[in-house]
Image (cartoon, rainbow, N blue to C red):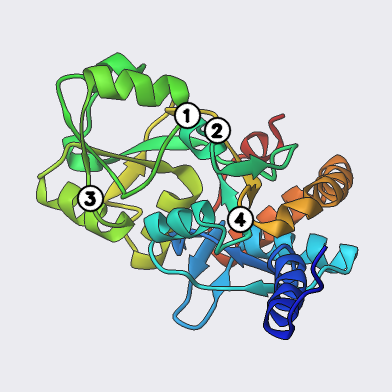
Amino acid sequence: MKPLTRPTLYAAMLLAFALPAAAQCERVVVSADPDYQPLHWYDGRALRGASIDLAVRILEDLGIPHEVRYTGPWKRVLAAAAAGQVDLVATLKIQPERERYLAFAHPAAFPNPVAVFIERQRAFSFRDWNDLKHLRGGVAMGNRFGPEFDKFAEANLHLHEAGTLDTNFRKLGLGRIDYFVVGLFAGEKYLASHGLNARFVALRPFVAEDRNYFAFARNSPCVKHLEAFEARLKEIVKSGGNLAVLNASLMQADIKVDSTTLGRK
């Protein structure tokens, strides 16, 4: 067996040091949808909200170095997670296509009911999804609402995907769409912030009794923390600590919801 020449040995040493470094998780990069108050949003300086608060609490409890990073619009956040550039997404709904590149932590972090918002002066009867078939609906870019509703919507509804909450509420006010589907908390927060509660309203029943989960990027070396993160999350959920974090965020956002909504298992 020939001894390694100096250049070859040097290259081998570089490779030996480079490979472990590439697989290390130096810190968990946390990101989220920047337009989904009060669960998570970007205030122009940093990401804030219940999802961020709970993620930071768990990572600090575990002594795991972390960084909360604004990554851009929601679709860009998901693309960064798929590439392993974002390690932890806080928080989102479970969808089959997302499970290909995200490992979800259980149990759910927060309840996140999805509602149909309408303009009060153009109200219509709403009992179930079928009542939306003949109407024009809107959704924000990248939003999904559960496999059952998404499948029904694809086959039966006229949904236009565009922009942000602001874009869709403006379209709703202009009569360009008849309803807007979005998470109850996010919709209520927008209306409260803009003084529009008297003009728009969320219908009952909800479109979906959805939930939001933390998820680690499968392509990230930080996915190794999933088990420990999940164990601490279970402890917090069991004690009701997650709902305390959510309630605090809702109060700051001046949102009033039924206690049954927050406490539903």
- Does residue 85 appear in the picture of this structure? yes
**Residue designated by label 3:** 162
Residue plotted at (10% across, 45% down): 175
118 relative position to 31: left or right = left
- Residue nearest the observer in this picture, 57 or 50: 57
- Tell me the CA gap for discs 1 and 2: 7 Å
Q: Secondary structure at mark 1?
A: loop
For marks 2 and 4, the one nearer the N-term is 4
Residue 252 left/right relative to 151: right
Discs 1, 3 touching: Cβ within 8 Å: no
- Asked if the residue under mark 2 is in contact with the one under mark 1, i.e. CB atoms within 8 Å, the reply is yes
Q: Which label number is shown at residue 146?
A: 1
Question: Where's the N terminus, which quadrant?
Answer: bottom right
Task: From this view, report whether residue 141 is shown above or below residue 8.
Answer: above
Q: Quadrant of the C terminus?
A: top right
Rounded to the nearest angstrom, the CA distance separating label 3 from label 4 is 22 Å
x%, y% of residue 95?
50, 33
| Amino acid under disc 4 | Ala
Q: Position of residue 77 (x, y in %)?
A: 46, 59
